[in-house]
Each structure stands twice: as C-alpha cells, then as structure tokens.
Image: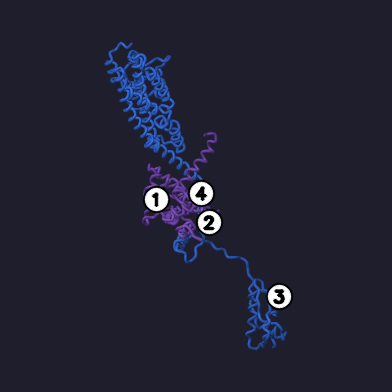
Chain colours: A blue, B purple
Amino acid sequence: MIKAEPVSILRFLATYYDIIRELYNIQNKEGIIRHEELTEICGRHEHDVHQQLKDYKILRSVNADFELRDVYYKLIEFILYEFKPMLPETFEKYLMSMSELFRKIKEGTHGDKMILSERIINLQTQIREFLDGVEKNTVRLLHETRELKANVDKVDYRVKVHKASFWIQYYIIPLNQVLNVNYSDSVANKLLDISDFANQRRLNFDEEGIRIQFEKLYNQLIQTNDDLLRQSKILTNELLPLIERIRTESMILTGWIEFLRNPYKVTTPKLLKSNRSAAYNKNLFFHTKEFFEQFMEDEEVFIEEDPQIYEQWIFNKANVKAKLKEQVPVQDFFSWCRNELMMEFKEVDAEKFFAMCTLLFEEDIEKEFSEKGTKVKIKTHHSRMTVPKIKILN
Amino acid sequence: MEYPKNHKEIVEDLMAGKFILPSAKHFESLRESEAFYAEFFKESFSYTLTVTNDYAYVVSPETQETLSRDISIFFAIVCYEMDRDGRNFLDQIQYSEFEMEDIDRMFENSSFIDLILSNKQLKDQDARRTLLNAMNRRHIIEKITEDRFTFTSAYKVFIEFAIELAKSRSKEVEPSDN
C-alpha cells in the first residue's frame, strides 16, 4: 500500500523528472538500474530521493539493484512517445484472450449476468490494450524507418539493407497480417465477429444493463475498427513503401559500390554491338561524329621507321631489249618475259613483268599477232593473266 | 508474307542497338508479336530479344562491352553522388530532369575522381557529353535540349545489374544467411 497522497506522488514526479528520465534511459539501455548508478544520479542532482522512490513504489528492488515499475516505465514511455516495438507474436496473446472471452460471453448469455458483465468489461480492456499496442508499434516503426532513411547513425548500405529487411520481415508484414480483415486468423477479423455479435445483442438482450454494455462494446469496436484501419493504411501506404525503398536504394548502392571497387573485372549488361553503317544510312552523320569525337584530343604518337631495307629494282630497258634482239625471232613474247624473270629472280613479279611488257611499244621491234587469236596464260607471284600470243620478228 | 505493324521501325531501331520504349508507337506492335521477333532475331542474326513492360532491346553474342561499362560507371557515380547529397536517387532518375552542369558538378566533386579521370568517356565535360550522346542514340536518356535530359525506363537494365551484383556479393559474403 502507498502511504503518500496521489498528488504528492505526481508532484514528486514533476519535481524530480530529470532524475526519473535518467533512470528510464538507463533501464531502457541496460534493462536494470544499478545501485551505484542510482547513487551517482542522485548525487549529481544533489537530491537524495532513494527513499521516496521506494515509498512511492516507483522503483522495485532486484537483488541489490533496481528497476522502474512497469506502470511508471509505461508512463514515461508514453510521455516521451518512445515506444519499444512489440513483436507481432506478442499480439497473439490478445487474439487468444479475446477469443476465449468472446467464446465464454456467447456461451454464457443465459448464465450468470454478473460474470457476463465482467467478461464484457475485460474484453473491452483487452481491445483497448491491443489497439494501444498497435498504435505504439506503428509510431515506433515509423520513427525507426525515418531514422534509417536519414541515416543518422551513418550505417553502411549493407547494414541498411539488413535493417530494412529485418523490420519488414519481423515487424511490418506480420503486423499487417494482424490488421488484415481478409486474413481469417487476424485479430481484426476476430474483432469483426465480436462487433457483429455485440451489434445483435445490444438490440435484443433481455436485461437492460447488459444491453447497455453490449452497446458500449459495439461503439468501442466501431471506433477501434476505424483506428485499426488508419494504422493499417499507415503501414501499407507509408511505412512499407518507405522501408522497401530504403532497402532497394541501399541494395542498388551496395551493388554500385561493389562495382566501382573494380569496374573492369565485372561483366556489365550486354549491349548490342552495332554494325558499320552504309554511306546512305540516316544515322551515318551521328556515327561519324561519335567516331571523330573520340579523336578530338590528339595523343602524342611516335612512329619508328622500319629499319628493313627493301631491294630497289630499276628496269634497264636497253639491256633487256638487247637480250631480246639477240634471241629473235621469239615465238611468244610474254612467255619469254616470264622465262627471263624466272631465270634471273626465281619468281615472276607482276611489277617487273609489266615493266618488260613496255618493250612492245618500242618502234624498232617488229611484232606479229596470232591470226587465230591464240591466248597464253602467265602466272605471276600474285596473279594469273591471260595475254595474246605475240611473235617478235626482229 | 505479311509482317507485323511497324516492322521496319522495330527492326531498324533494334538493329541499331536502341532500346524501344513504351512511349514509342512501335512498342505495342513489338509486344504483340514478341514471339515472332524473338525467333526472327535469333534465326537471322543470333541476337537475343528482351521485352519487358519498360523496354525492349536485342543483344548479340558479341557485345559492346566498353560502352556498357562506361554507362554502368556513369550510373554508379550519379546514384552514389545523389545519395550522398541526401537526394532520393531512384525518384530523381525516374522523374527528374538533369542538367549537364549538375552532372559535371557530381563528377568533379566525386570521391571516385581517380576512376573518372582514367576513363576516356567520363574524364571531362566533353567526354561525358559524347557518352551522353551515345546514350541518347540508344534511348537510355532522352535529350530535352543540348544541356538537359531525362532518363528513360531503360535505366532499369543498369539498376537491375547493380541489384543483382549486390545480391550475388552478399551471398558470397554470407553463405549461410537465408
């Protein structure tokens, strides 16, 4: 039993709020308030409030240490609007208790009215607590998501992906299921059943007192339904897209950073290698422009001269002409040229062959063409030629 | 033989390595005759046709790797720098217009400056304009004026590439994480 007046306790809370707040923070962080920490805080604030904290049942002893009693912890949590997110599994206890109470209310409509009334009141409390829990969770999840988006802790993108996935997988999606009326096992669906039942009983129950209680339950459920719908909308329209985007964006950035670490060792998306365009292609101008743009900035180029020395051949017409004259009559001029080249160079080079052919235009060389038009085939180093058979007479 | 509607435009664009986008009049024709064109490009040129809700394009066994790599680096730096500025880069790429000046500022102040300077297509303003011209021709961006452009939905090819890379790397790092 608390001996103090309620107003004294409230005044104490207001006067020593700073101390209470610090105790709350410690419990939030460490789960317990160590004796030394309590002494240190009181010393720092120059107020020894050990005794009041015990007398007003604000602190509970845990061996040599302390913890804030749940009611005060929740009060501070609510005032600060700093809620710890509840795992959706925690909500299932409400589903269980509400289902059980609802079953007993249905079965006990003809039984003791006193217990029926108590059960309705208890059910209302469960519904209120459930709604509170959902609201707190949404607030906390929104806060966490916005913190993650702003990245105040400067966490790595990979950690962001992990955190976002964690919130989605363990909190947001399961909470959404709890609130989804289309899901048969959801709390929202159970509330709908209760609402239907309360709606009937508020109209047709024999006893007026219970009828009024069903009326209250029904009205509470209408309000609860609106509130849950609002929470569900926040989850699906705001929270889920926001956190999904954080996850996607963080994932993209993780990929890009990974890529930028060594962009030349990763296979990038395939793009079509376009073929060379015809001169009449309508895109030729742009392709040419693109091609030339690559060379806008000239790089310094060094050209080394080829040290290989080529043998330079000069056609000595007088010499060859004299040789031809010595051998006249020559039956086939082109074959003679080929043979001469073969004898001298062991191959028939086209350039040398054509140079020798110029002898035909010499005026003092008498030629005779085959009347039958006989052709001769000459094979040079790189080509095959079909030439007429020409006889040299003189 | 009767060819699908807009056959000439479809073939011309795809053969030029362009993305065909939903805004193009021949996109629908291509989607309707997707099976025909998939076979047509496979049989005629050994090209693979990819059609999604956001784009269509073909790839050859031989690909333009340098261009793809330069574009990927371009996207990587643009996304990274926008995020560093606190901008929602995905929204910006999807819905915003970009100015060349803005892009130049991002590249000039980037911490990846060594990589940028060593890349012929990204090292300076002129080089980046050349790269953007190539992206414009392939319909990866759409130029509004000489200095302003928007990204087309073809950006998703490169964003998907980054996501896949992140996934594959995270699998390598955390083989037991599922």
Q: Which residue is mark 3?
A: A342
* 3D distance between C-alphas at marks 3 and 1: 70 Å
Q: Which residue is mark 2?
A: B40
- Residue A298 to residue A102: above or below: below
Q: Which residue is mark 1?
A: B103
Amino acid at pointer 1: Ile
**Callout 2 environment at 10 Å: few (<14), some (14 to 19), or many (20+)?**
some
Amino acid at pointer 3: Met
Residue A297 seen in the figure = no
Give the secondary structure at mark 4. Answer: loop
Residue B12 is left or right of residue A26, and the answer is: right
Q: In the rendering, which numbered label is found on residue A268?
A: 4
Q: Quadrant of residue B6?
A: bottom left
Give the secondary structure at mark 2. Answer: helix
Q: Nearer the viewer, mark 2 or mark 1?
A: 2
Image marks 4 and 1: residues in contact by CB distance under 8 Å? no
Residue B147 in picture, x, y percent from top left: 37, 55
Amino acid at pointer 4: Thr
Write down the chain letter for disc 1.
B
